[in-house]
Image (spheres, helix red, strand yellow):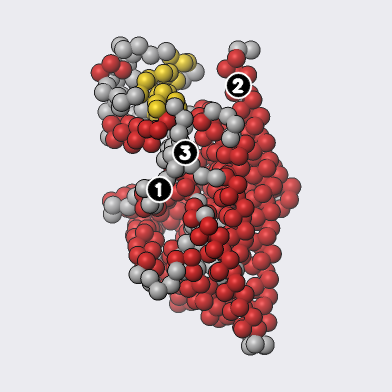
Amino acid sequence: MDKQKIINLKLMAISLVVGIVAGLVVGAFRFAIGQMQTFWLTIFKAAHAELWLLGVILLGFIIIGLVAGYLVKQEPHAGGSGIPEVELQLQGKLHLNWWSILWRKFLGGVLAIGSGLFLGREGPSIQLGAAIGQGFGSKTSQTNRRVLIATGAASGLSAAFGAPLGGTMFVLEEVFHNFSPRVWLNSLTGALAANFLVSNLFGQKPVLAIPYNHPFDVHLYGHLIILGIILGLVARFYQWGLLNGKKIYDKLTFIPRFMHGLIPLFLLIPIAFIMPQIIGGGNELILSWHSINAIKLLSIIFIVRIIFSIISYDSGLPGGIFLPILTMGAILGELYGLIMVRLGMLPEGLVVNLVIFSMAGLFSGIVRSPFTAILLITEMVGSLLHLMPLAVLALVAYLVNDLLGGKPIYESLADRMETANLEVYADNVDELTVTIFEESKLADKEVKEIKWPEKTLVKLIHRGAHDIIPFGKTKLLAGDLVVLEVDSKCRSKVYDQIKAMQK
């Protein structure tokens, strides 16, 4: 066995350990959030008979807001979902203290998400996993460290949703933007290990196990086009709202930034008192979709959820938008289905299909990761019956959002970050792997014809199962993975330059 294969096997062994540890941490995170939400729901229900308990809730929420806000004040990158931070880390633009992130994200996430705010656990779970990967990779090369960060991120999402394939695809498609064999192989290893662990803790039942037995006939696909257009429009509005909501918070200069979380917590009290069944990320709301079949009530719930999701996220408290997006998609699918049933244009038994399809459609439109949407919902629901119509709806929503000028939400959030004070890596030499896409301007060009960024050396080309040592006349082909040796201080700059060169 050659030296490189031994190195790869060692890295895979570390990835396995990263997956196990990420499974333990995220499993505990899931459990703690569930217990916290149950606790607050119990108090809210009791408050209908004992109104004085509203004072207890108010005091508790003030403590939660101040504690979680202070944790984010100490470590700003522990706020929000954490996915933009992971994306910047993998680009070499951001270096974080993994331990500082890990414990603050865990505690702050349990407090904020467990309170019932419209926040999801998946983004924080991805960052928790990434922090664990970074910790295990602290004594390895920077290239291997990034592979382990990606592995941890995939493991975190896998543990959060019981979706190892969706977790791996999300990291490749949306976060890492690189389908390198080293990345996907180690990410899948960690994701499978994490899923195995949480399956033993929470059982093997899919997170969103919604039973249905009727296939969606091809002659009804016109509904998918109409619904896809609606989802694409809603996705664009949500992107706009999420990116501009923070501007409203910024105008509240009389309230310290770390106390902005008190605003959604105060607003949550009347919402939870009146409609306790709709609070939280939305997992239970999706599973009980059939219990609410009034069009007017569903419309009100959707409006409340989309507005309050933006308010919750832009406050800066730890929490993600993954599950809230799926919840809004499920509500829109049921709304459309019920309207069509009332009009006599759709069998009532197919409403559940649209609930499932729309989760993938809205996710695809907002996050702009259609393959992840398809795999994720397939794993979370636990059925392949919906694969074709689900893919059609995801594609239509994606295209509509694209035509409206939408961009991947996590990439947009990363771009929005203040980067002036980001701490970049400081070692001398680093590696950057780039994929030559089919439409890339670098495809079919010889290495010597390309004006590479300063301090950049083309070190290796992965082509299929072969590794090619490049020469000046070596032609780059679509699908090649090109390994560049760069000055680590300029890595992020080279990353952006290569990205621009391919367009």
Residue type, label 1 = Asn
Residue for badge 1? 421
Q: Position of residue 153 (x, y in %)?
A: 55, 43
Rendered image: mark on residue 90: 3
Tell me, yes or no, whether the two marked residues, 1 and 2, touch with CB atoms within 8 Å: no
Residue type, label 2 = Ile
Q: Quadrant of residue 346?
A: bottom left
In the structure shown, which secondary structural element does the residue marked by tag 1 occupy? Answer: loop
In the structure shown, which secondary structural element does the residue marked by tag 3 occupy? Answer: helix
Q: Which residue is drawn at 57% across and 45% down?
A: 98
Asked if residue 149 can be seen in this view, the reply is: yes
Tell me, yes or no, whether the two marked residues, 3 and 2, touch with CB atoms within 8 Å: no
Task: State the residue in front, 447 or 223.
Answer: 447
Residue for badge 2? 7
Q: Which residue is drawn at 58% across and 29% down?
A: 140
Q: How crowded is mark 2: few (under 14 residues within 10 Å), some or many (20 or more)?
A: few
**Which quadrant, please, contains the C terminus?**
top left
Residue placed furthest toward the right? 200
Q: Residue at x 59, y 34 (%)?
A: 137
